[in-house]
């Protein structure tokens, strides 16, 4: 196959990208997106601050624009993200526990109802664990006021609203075997043992020289798959350039293809021009939408 999406489809997988609604009007951006990718994740448009900037007042315009663009071209959509400590409007942090629980469940219910049937996987909870060796939960309004049970509650609510959507837990620095990924592993294992609904785990996979593709990446994906969940590479970018960057991308694709339950790869942007990583050139297309060595490596590996 001659495009990322078609090559991934031949392997029974999708190949997606993060998309920003405000770039869809740029011809080269849209044509690269439409030609190469068969799944999209709104980069910011489905975060809480974008969708519910004030309590129970929802604004779906930019997110709908992306969903409509994708649906009319047969692309899948990943929903990102329902419950996260970041890009959270100030009013949420000001609520007491009882109101916060109501607001969390209402946010999940309203948003998932609006997009019901249109989202193949939802990142229900994003980044709930700390970095480092503790394996502890990260402080957030949800964690601090609702306690450890907030993740379970969010997943249970999500399942009742859209039973057809795959429900994912998503995080970073969990790509290899380490204390943080062990903590997520134990959460998933516990959920499976107790029948708490969870279908997938997302591995963000933001890599650079300080945090390269782990040597045990495939093994880590496999141990999660062995718990009975799908795994997805959800926000892939790799700082660097040339053949070294290309080789790292090859490793990532091979890791996913080596795990039968790795259902797809999403890169975190179409072009280096709009990457969120301030320094560097971490994506597959350069600032002029030329295919990089990393692009050729991915297409070859797929
Ligand atoms: C980033 C976006 O790319 C930026 O545009 C925004 O300013 C901040 O968020 N983990 C996630 C993503 O789950 O939502 C983040 O996206 C990158 C890190």
Image (tube, grey):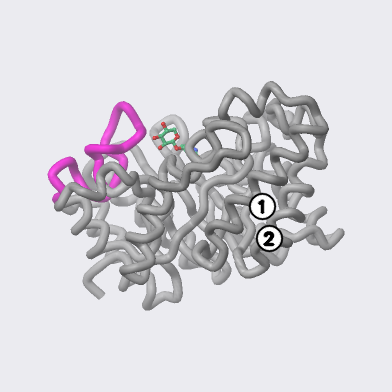
Please determine whether, in this image, residue 135 is positioned above or below residue 25: above
Task: Return the residue at label 2.
Answer: 161
Q: Is residue 201 magenta?
A: no
- Closest to the observer: 281 or 159? 159
Nearest the eye: 229 or 81: 81
Q: Can residue 251 be seen in the rendering of this structure?
A: no
Callout 2–callout 1 Cβ contact below 8 Å: yes
Element on which disc 2 rests: helix
Nearer-the-camera pick, 3 or 75: 75
Q: Where does the image place residue 14, in percent across and percent down from the top left?
A: 42, 67
In the rendered structure, the answer to whether residue 163 lies left or right of residue 63 reads right
Q: Residue at x 53, y 59 (%)?
A: 115
The quadrant the N terminus occupies is: bottom left
| Residue 91 x/y as whole percent | 63, 25
Which quadrant holds residue 103?
top right
Estimate the x, y position of residue 166 in percent, counting from the top left: 61, 63
Q: Earlier in the sequence, mark 2 or mark 1?
A: 1
User: Is residue 145 toward the left or the right of residue 269 in the image?
Assistant: right
Left or right of 132: which side holds 35? left
* Residue 289 magenta-highlighted: yes
Residue 77 visible to the viewer: yes
Snapshot quadrant of residue 223: bottom right
- The residue under label 1 is 109
Q: Which residues are magenta?
A: 271-290
Counting every numbered tag in the picture gives: 2
Residue at image position (56%, 52%) is 202
């Amino acid at each position: 196959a001659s495009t990322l999406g078609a090559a991934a489809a031949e392997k029974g997988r999708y190949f997606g990208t993060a998309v920003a609604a405000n770039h869809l009007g740029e011809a080269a951006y849209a044509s690269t997106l439409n030609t190469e990718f068969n799944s999209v994740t709104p980069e910011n448009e489905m975060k809480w601050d974008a969708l519910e900037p004030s309590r129970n007042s929802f604004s779906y315009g930019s997110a709908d624009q992306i969903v409509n663009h994708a649906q009319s071209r047969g692309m899948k959509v990943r929903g990102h993200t329902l419950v996260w400590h970041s890009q959270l409007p100030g009013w949420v942090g000001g609520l007491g526990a009882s109101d916060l629980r109501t607001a969390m469940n209402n946010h999940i219910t309203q948003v998932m109802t609006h997009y019901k049937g249109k989202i193949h996987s939802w990142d229900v909870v994003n980044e709930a664990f700390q970095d480092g060796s503790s394996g502890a939960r990260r402080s957030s309004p949800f964690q601090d006021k609702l306690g450890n049970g907030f993740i379970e509650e969010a997943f249970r609510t999500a399942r009742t609203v859209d039973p057809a959507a795959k429900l994912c837990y998503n995080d970073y620095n969990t790509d290899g075997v380490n204390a943080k990924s062990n903590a997520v592993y134990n959460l998933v294992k516990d959920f499976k043992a107790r029948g708490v609904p969870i279908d997938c785990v997302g591995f963000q996979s933001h890599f650079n020289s300080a945090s390269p593709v782990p040597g045990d990446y495939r093994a880590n994906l496999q141990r999660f798959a062995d718990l009975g969940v799908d795994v997805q590479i959800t926000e892939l970018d790799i700082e660097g350039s040339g053949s070294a960057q290309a080789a790292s991308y090859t490793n990532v694709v091979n890791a996913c293809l080596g795990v039968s339950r790795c259902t797809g790869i999403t890169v975190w942007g179409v072009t280096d021009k709009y990457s969120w990583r301030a320094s560097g050139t971490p994506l597959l297309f350069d600032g002029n939408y030329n295919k990089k060595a990393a692009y050729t490596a991915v297409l070859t590996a797929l």
